Amino acid sequence: MWSMGAAENGALPERLAALLRILDGHSPADPKEARDIQLIKRLICQHSDIMSPRCQVGHITASALVIDCASGRILLHFHRKLCRWLQVGGHLEGETDVAQAALREAREETGLPDLAFFPLAAAVPVDLDVHTIPVQPDMPAHLHLDFRYLLTTRQPHALAPERGESLQFRWLSVEQALAMGDALDSSLRRLLRKAQEHVRA
């Protein structure tokens, strides 16, 4: 276990120190996101395997909200295990770069060939969220410490998810998505509003 100052004196492995730098540079949009950032920091300092899906208390995940450049619509898919409409994303698979993990997951889950980070100049998360994943046959209930990015595509018609991925997708305006109400959790609604602000800017 490391202290919160471990990154400053070099005791924290670089892959974890990089995560803390991302968290330190992020401005939370609401009290929930602010609390989640502090929780993620604490768990990073307590668990050296926090980037591995095998860390049972919880682990880092990477997700992305995909935006159609031409129409401004966003892409949601129906998660088969959680039975909810969500952005694409999932676990890290040995990556130490969370942004690249989000890009890989998005490519696998959508098959879109031209995904790119928005904005291009900086692959930084636009949102950070902690949520509980219910007990699974091979895993107790645990936390997902989710780093959330924006990706763009100019080929929304090219959806071709890999075998075994979700086949239920919706291209929606942000307004249409927000109108889904309780079908979306509050953190996804926050992510949608942030995406809307970024696109307008």
Image (tube, helix red, strand yellow):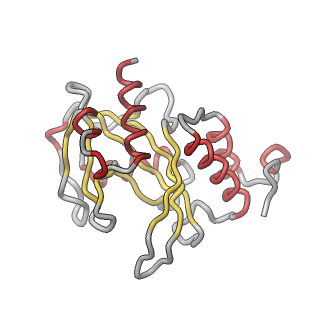
Q: Picture coordinates of residue 42 (x, y %)?
A: 70, 55
Residue that appears at 63% across and 53% down:
40
Q: Residue furthest top?
A: 201
Q: Nearer the viewer, residue 122 or 146?
A: 146
Is residue 182 shown left or right of residue 186?
left
Q: Measured from the top left, where is residue 155 in percent x and y?
A: 19, 35
In percent of width and height, residue 22 lies at 62, 40
Find the residue positioned furthest to the left. Answer: 157
Residue at 70 percent across and 47 percent down: it is 17
Question: Which quadrant holds residue 134?
Answer: bottom left
Q: Residue at x 67, y 38 (%)?
A: 24
| Camera-nearest residue between 86 and 181 | 181
The residue most toward the right is 9
119 lies above or below 80: above
Residue at 25% across, 56% down = 78
* Left or right, 111 with reference to 135: left
- In percent of width and height, residue 154 lies at 23, 31
Relative to 55, 84 lies left or right: left
Q: Which residue appears farthest toward the front when viewing the image?
A: 182
Image quadrant where one finds the C terminus: top left
Quadrant location of the N terminus?
bottom right
Above or below, 65 relative to 139: above
The answer to whether residue 113 is visible is no
**Could one spot residue 130 in this view of the protein?**
yes
Q: Is residue 173 above or below residue 61?
A: above
In the picture, measured across the screen, residue 33 lies left or right of residue 84, that is right
Quarter-of-image position of residue 70: top left
